Image (tube, rainbow, N blue to C red):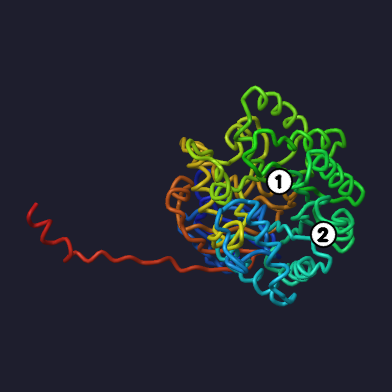
Amino acid sequence: MIITNAKLYGKKGLWNLSLREGKIFSITPSQPLSNQVNAAILDIHGKLILPPFVEPHIHLDYVLTAGTPRWNQSGTLFEGIQCWSERKVSVKETKADIKNRALQALKMQMKHGVQHVRTHVDITDPSFLGLEAMLEIKEEIRPWMDVQIVAFPQEGIYAYPKGDELLEESLNMGADVVGAIPHYEFTREDGVLSVKKALELAYKYGKMVDIHCDEIDDEQSRFLEVVAAESYKLGMGEHVTASHTTAMGSYNNAYAYKLFKLLKQANIHFVSLPKANLHLQGRFDTFPKRRGITRVKELLDADINVCFGLDSIMDPWYPLGDGNLQRVVEVGLHACHMTGYEDITSAYDLITINGAKTLNLQQYEIKEGNKANFIVLDTDNEYDAVRCQPSVLYSVREGKIMVETKPAETQMHASIFSKQFSEN
């Protein structure tokens, strides 16, 4: 296949992409093709091509469960955890039920150009039903989407009975990434131990780490410094991710200044979840209300890797969502005061390149020799992509069109305006 007249993300001009055997064989300046070309030709007429969107943080075992057994009335993280704990007891789902919900969510994400997903799976469940379901889905959906599984102790490594044993067993079962939630442990000491345990297990089993870290408005919740310091000491920062880190938005600047030096040295990754955390955080504030989002702009300015994720699709922690990461970008830019021109035109780094770094994806970028995985948006420039949130016209995986969307057509009937025009 040959893709002609493509606007490549972050580059000027129009380009032709020649695809062979599932890879990008060549990228050349756009020019008319010879009539002798023996290949399918797709002329995209200057539309924008990007690497596939990367979802770095979602909970596929939770999706589409909002309201059962009850709604999260306070909108807080902690009531969400309580709702989920009650659901595990009261709703007797089968593995097939969990897989069906997760596949519905993955289909939503696929429609919106996502080809890489990291999902957290609750392993504070001795039956491991959710983990087994996700391990099966990972293999079944592999031709269309890459899935990484985080063994996530939702109710704590030490706050939940034998949580540490369940975490290690989940790694033996095939989870790709070690999780933790230190701010939910009973004490700070247990929280510190949970971080050390997660890193210890990751080092032992050769896994990556993704920790739900300081997802709270408490300015004294400072497990991020523990994650960064321990990662630095072990020399494994590039394999470690701190998700949420919303407490950083409440840290005083003097402490944050000291912290950033450590973060830079540690070389860890960050995942910000703007929509979910705008919803969850600030719930205990009257006015002024905190935004509850980590210091995205400041981290980027310090050349520290940050990406955006969705977190939830209709679950006890977030009642909305449809898998569209473009909406996350728009909300995040507003919430983080990142609406300068350069912030906008490079914003899709947050759901493409930066996410790929976090997940340690290989052959990800659009370049010769890499896998022919990319998406085409219904726009011809990066600025309008953010402003208008265009449809994903094509999602191509290993050179084959996986998703195709026909753009909507709007007709303006002149008769509606004719009277006004004649009066003017």
x 67%, y 59%: residue: 59
Label 1 sits on what residue type? Lys
Q: Position of residue 223 (x, y in %)?
A: 75, 37
The label nearer to you, 2 versus 1, is 2
Q: Relative to 206, is 95 on the left or the right? A: left
> Closest to the observer: 52 or 272?
272
Please give the residue where the numbered disc 1 appears in the rendered image.
357
Label 1 SS: helix
Work out whether 18 lies above or below 258. Answer: below
Q: How packed is label 1: few (under 14 Cα within 10 Å), some, or many (20 or more)?
A: some
Label 2 sits on what residue type? Ala
Residue farthest to the left, as pictured: 423
Q: How packed is label 2: few (under 14 Cα within 10 Å), some, or many (20 or more)?
A: many
Work out whether 264 lies above or below 24. Answer: above
How many marks the image carries: the answer is 2
Camera sees residue 343: yes
> Closest to the observer: 252 or 340?
252
Q: Quadrant of residue 136?
A: bottom right
Work out whether 204 lies above or below 223. Answer: below
Q: Position of residue 152 (x, y in %)?
A: 77, 55
x 65%, y 33%: residue: 219
Please give the residue where the numbered disc 2 appears in the rendered image.
175
